[in-house]
Amino acid sequence: MIEIRNLSFGYTRKSLLFKDLDLQLRRGHIYGLLGKNGAGKSTLLKNMIGLAYPQAGSCSFNGINVSGRPVAVLEEVYFLAEEVFVPSLTPEQFAASTAAFYPKFSNADFYQYLKALDVDATAAMDKQSFGQQKKAMIAFGLATNTSLLVMDEPTNGLDIPSKVQFRKLIASLLTEDRCIIISTHQVRDLDSLIDTLLILHNREIVVNHPIEEITEKITFGVFNDTTGMQVLYEEDGMRGKNAIIKNTSGKFSKMDLELFFNAVTTGNTTLIQILKAD
Amino acid sequence: MNNIFNTKRFGRLFIKQLAEHYKTYLMALSVLVGVMLVGGSFFVYLIPTPLDISTQLILFTGLYLLAGTIFTSTIFADVSDRKKAIGYLTLPASHFEKFLVGWLFSFAVFTVVYTVSFYCILTILLNLKHWPHQHTYVLNVLVYPFSGIFLVFMLLHSITICGSLFFEKLHFIKTGFSFFIAVILLSLINTSLLKALTGRDVRTATPFSNMSFIENGKDYWVSASTAFEPMVAYIIFAVSIVFWVAAYYRLKEKQV
């Protein structure tokens, strides 16, 4: 669905955020994009949807180059920015003026999502709190039924019940024709939601693996003593040592996204080599 | 073609622009009408005769150019605001349709609304007082030479719409500043060219204006024949198109 080839991008020519970056994203997956502050997560998302133009290389959606923002691409893509802007309209007025631009928009879905997220369809959006505004735009974005849904920090500003609802909605939305990309700092919000993990570090995608594949190769656990174990990475925790070890037993463990992210971004090459090995 | 222009989509975009901005537009219109009414009443009570054609023309032109350029400088302001720009640029409509909607609102719609408002206020003002034995005249901006004002606005509009897309902040001020700097530079170049062509010490002259100089203690004033007026109109039209095209491409290239 999304194909990025040799992408180089930087806000100035001298300092590039990405250099010769390659990435392929397929339908039927929920991708979680992680990276440190300033790694370029938002910029990468903007390149994917044509909000930023690469200095070299290309980014295409279903074979169409996204640079120039062709309508055929925009009709199939919805981007939810970290900081949303809402006009001085109610959600239902906004849908009435904007929904027609998205060929697969469903009014029934829109009202259902508004209800699930506890948003009043008849209240002016610009008079609402930031969280309510964001939820209204999330409901609209989900109701567009575009085949690509890109969300940058979607849970920022959402209260705990809304985060739970959001996760439920996203999980229920994935179809074989749809691709969802979520970028976030709040790795816990992605727990049990994403099926493929992308980590952007040092101008490249260092991890692009399904969660299942990761947990097949490595194990996460809390241990009192890790002596004698094939420890790939460990951190002191409240209940002992949170560690990542090579999975030799063939058993699956629950992935600790935060621990894994820390291991990767501290430059743990052994871990990455294990993941890359067939 | 569907990726460039679609009538249905364009119609939707036009309605969306209206739905999201009509409150601001109505407020701006009421301010404009207020200025016309208060300013015009001041003139009516100050001048003992009915407003003559030249006063009407000055009022129409001054307010038209000022209000029109201020409004035009805000038409693409959303594109400079990162939060607003994301929603605007990712909306499934072509850049051409987006540009055309902005152009229509700031040029065509504004001109019609402004002209209608002006004549409504003018009718009120001319009937505010009774002038016995004096005939009142009403300016007709649609006939030559008064209609030339629309050509001037066309040029200023194209420059302002360009500025609204090229500058990130303070669009009106920065465009105005750039415009005057450009006029000064062009005038200096033009004057040097005229000096070189005529071999006389000509006074500073803006492009396409008259030329004046002193020779043997006499003041000479050289103006182009009226036969050249259509050519000047064509040049203004061509320059406006160049600025509009530049603005369109700037919108196309816009990144967030």
Image: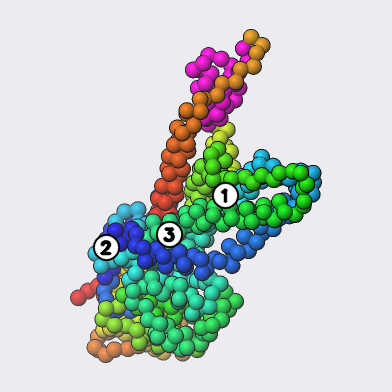
Q: Are marks 3 and 2 in contact (CB under 8 Å)?
A: no
Q: CA distance from mark 3 to mark 2?
A: 21 Å
Looking at numbered disc 1 in the image, what kind of residue is underneath it?
Answer: Thr
Three-letter amino acid code of the residue under disc 2: Ile
Give the tally of numbered discs: 3
Chain letter of disc 2?
Answer: A
**Residue occupying image coordinates x 53% and y 80%:** A132
The Cα atoms of the two marked residues, 1 and 2, are separated by 38 Å
Q: Is residue A10 above or below residue B235?
A: below
Quarter of the C terminus of chain A within the rendering: bottom left
Instruction: Find residue A187 and report its horizontal and vertical position in percent.
Output: 43, 79
Task: Based on the picture, tell me whether residue B207 belongs to the magenta stretch.
Answer: yes
**Where residue A55 sits: x, y (%)?**
35, 53
Q: Amino acid at mark 3?
A: Lys
Q: Which residue is mark 2?
A: A64
Q: Is residue A267 above or below residue B242?
A: below
Q: Residue furthest left?
A: A278
Q: Per the image, is B62 magenta?
A: no
Q: Which chain's residue wears label 1?
A: B
| Residue B189 can be seen in this image | no
